[in-house]
Image (spheres, helix red, strand yellow):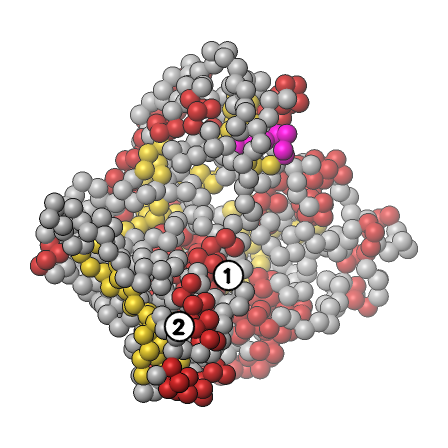
Amino acid sequence: MATDLGELLVPYMPTIRVPKTGDRVFKSECAFSFDSPESEGGLYVCMNTFLGFGREHVERHYRKTGQSVYIHLKRHVKEKATGAAGGNISRRRNGKVFLDLELNRDFNGEDYEYEDEAKLVIFPDHFEIPLPNIEELPALVTIACDAVLNAPSAYKKQEPESWEEEIQVSRHARSLRQLDNGVRVPPSGWKCQKCEMRENLWLNLTDGAMLCGKWFFDGSGGNGHALDHYKETKHPLAVKLDTITPDGADVYSFEEEEAVLDPHISDHLFHFGIDMLQMQKKTENGHHTDNNARPRVSEWEVIQESGMKLKAVYGSGYTGIKNLGNSCYLSTVMQVLFSIPEFQRMYVGNLQKIFDYSPLDPTQDFATQMAKVGHGLLSGQHSKPPMKSELIEQHQQKGISPRMLKSLVSRAHPEFSSNRQQDAQEFFLHMINLVERNSTSSENPSDAFRFLVEERVQCCQTRRVRYTQRVDYCIQMPAPIEAATNREELMAYEVKRREAEENMRAPPEPVRARIPFTACLQAFTEPQNVPDFWSSALQAKSAGVKTCRFASFPEYLVVQIKKFTFGVDWVPKKLDLGIDVPDFLDLSRLRATGLQSGEEELPDLMPPIVLPEDTRDNSMSSLDSPEIDEAAVMQLAEMGFPLEACRKAVYYTGNMGPEMAFNWIIAHMEEPDFAEPLLLPSMLDPGPSLSIDNPMGATPLDNSPPEESISILTSMGFPRTHTIQALKATNNNLERALDWIFTHPEEEDSDALSNMADTEPNDNALSNANSHSDSTLSPERGTTGGPRVKDGPGRYEIFAVISHMGASTMSGHYVCHIKKEGRWVIYNDHKVSLSERPPKDLGYIYFYHRLSSS
């Protein structure tokens, strides 16, 4: 028999590989579906590529690649047998076959056991060889099978990569000496012992001194009294007070100059009267919420509809998503996206086509993984009502685990690739960006969100104006606290809170601000000051105001409430407020009007650009040198900002002081050229490039723009040649390139638009939108000279809400409510239920769909 098996495998030996270091073995999940070894058909792992496939998809991989040899993995879940004395009999067959294989089902480990089975399968005849079979298989095949069976799963192998570094145990932790000086730390009212700082406080674990940290840009702000204390006393360890949870705390070693672990932190804190178990409590979902932060507890209960008997729902469109560890921001965004028909048609309607044309490694293909998640959510295969036998137990919905999609979309992203909580709005825009990049065909589901914003900037001194357009996918609505209807109650609470802090008493019952949505909308539409405005009419800095209007209305409108602000330590903190967001929204009056009669446009000139001193032309006169307050520059640089960014900030704020420059830095720090040296045209070669015909002065570099940037712009509908020209003219800056395209239309595009206007006179919504009714708008514009937008009426109805619980975007939990089939449904990770009372007033991101003109 051994000879027969050896001869049978001879033709396939060249295709059988032993996993090497760096190879990922996908033995826990199918590349095209959520089939696993626990699924009815098990999982097939290719012995050449180490990709996993369910029974439905393994034939496709065989036909595409010709790979014939697979390991079939099957895990059987069974109830434990009960012995005569009533105890469970422990039995497990082939228990070491699936080392490191994660359990995908939520069975009680005390009542169930797992029996693992592995076979070598040869296609197309589906010939099976049970494993282990050391005596009969060739040595190479046996080694390869053992390596696959004992390899860690692909995701476990990736987890360490999401952490920047491994924190080590401090050498002072075990032998730390603590003074018996009677210090007891109160539960609230903390303040630095040497200044008035109430944020970023550190407790010295030797003597109980409560002092502030040093000012750094990375999120810690203070006057450095904790470090000064160490220099005086040499007491090495300190714990950050607002990080203490039952699971641990952030500990820093001044002597070792790094964050460290303290295995005895509970005892060390108890010495000063701090019980870790009382500092924070967990909710049923495993997310943390402070005991002392009472509004957060109420917020958690209201948003999750705790205390109500919610009825679970099952079937197509009612599948939950498992929390992979602070991944609820991803879950809520994906649930909303796949409730939209455009995304359903693109990825689920084209499922077979996407799978058939997927690359050899489908785990790295965006369309494949989107189709996989979409099908998992909409097929109903992973959302089935419990069987009668399961009704006796507390049956829970399982949902899907989008590990492959998360790994793919977060790759190389510093935040989304981590295991930390993230901002759902930022992830939504990240997903839209990925959809744009990967939509090479004319079908692009993100078109449904895209709209044009008209920005009108007016020079207050000359009254001249400039109109520009930009693409956007979400409007950010301010939440003006001063417009709260319960303002007096808020002011009274603030007085009591300050008194409690000063007297180190427990804080009063918090008060939630109630803000009318009309006030938010008014704040959004009001003119905004442009502090560093450069007037091309005056050729100098001047006061300017900017107003924004809709040049087009999207099919689906996304509204984010700006609930988050920065605390003293520059960590995002959430404002405690409720807004009476309407079910129906009419924004027709906010349609852009374009240049009006009597308005005079600002000259099309760009502001000067600053050059660093070492690149200046020594022959230039001193009059051409920029005036920069070097003292302000150094003050900003000491905070940790790049020197060139500080110089830019001071220059563009007109030397109005470090505070204004600091605000400029915060507003521009995400720009790709944030830390690059600045260029002043007046400091370049004063040749023809500085003529009136070329007032910008600088000649664009003759470099080829990145193909990725070109594809992003072309996916929006811009011609490739025009896109390349725009990127070259703006040094490959995407945002500036978009502005350049709008202000520099191609001549042939102008002709095309002119011809279009002859045949469709009502399509010119940008020049004078008020001259026609919404019903005459073209359903899709910009197919020749601009981005594709699905313009239409500005009347909307709400259909989804993403809500956040917690004090910061860096912590807490997200859930979403979606209106389906006339009823609201709450999606809370893997649990999907009918909503009894959707908390629309506490939402963070609102999704509206356009109402028909009829």
The amino acid on which the numbered mark 1 sits, given as a three-letter code, is Arg
* Percent position of residue 62, x then y: 39, 83
Res 90 label: none
* Percent position of residue 134, x then y: 40, 72
Secondary structure at numbered mark 1? loop
Asked where in the image residue 155 lies, by quadrant, the reply is bottom left
Q: Is residue 697 left or right of residue 675?
A: right
Query: Quick check: 306 above or below 264?
Result: below
Question: Could you tell me which residue is drawn at 54 percent across and 36 percent down?
Answer: 169
Tag 1 or tag 2, which sits nearer the N-term?
Answer: 2
In the rendered image, the residue lying farthest to the right is 619
As measured in the structure, the alpha-carbon distance from the residue carrying label 2 to the one carrying label 1 is 39 Å
For mark 1, what is the residue? 411
Query: Quick check: 99 above or below 774?
Result: above
The amino acid on which the numbered mark 2 sits, given as a three-letter code, is Ile
Q: Is residue 216 left or right of residue 107?
A: right
Decide whether residue 721 is among the magenta residues: no
Asked where in the image residue 236 lies, by quadrant, the reply is top right
Question: Could you tell me which residue is drawn at 54 percent across and 20 percent down?
Answer: 177
Q: Is residue 570 left or right of residue 1?
A: right
Secondary structure at numbered mark 2? loop
Query: Quick check: 759 above or below 791?
Result: below
For mark 2, what is the residue? 134
**Is residue 559 in sight in this rendering?**
no
Chain part drawn in magenta: 251-257
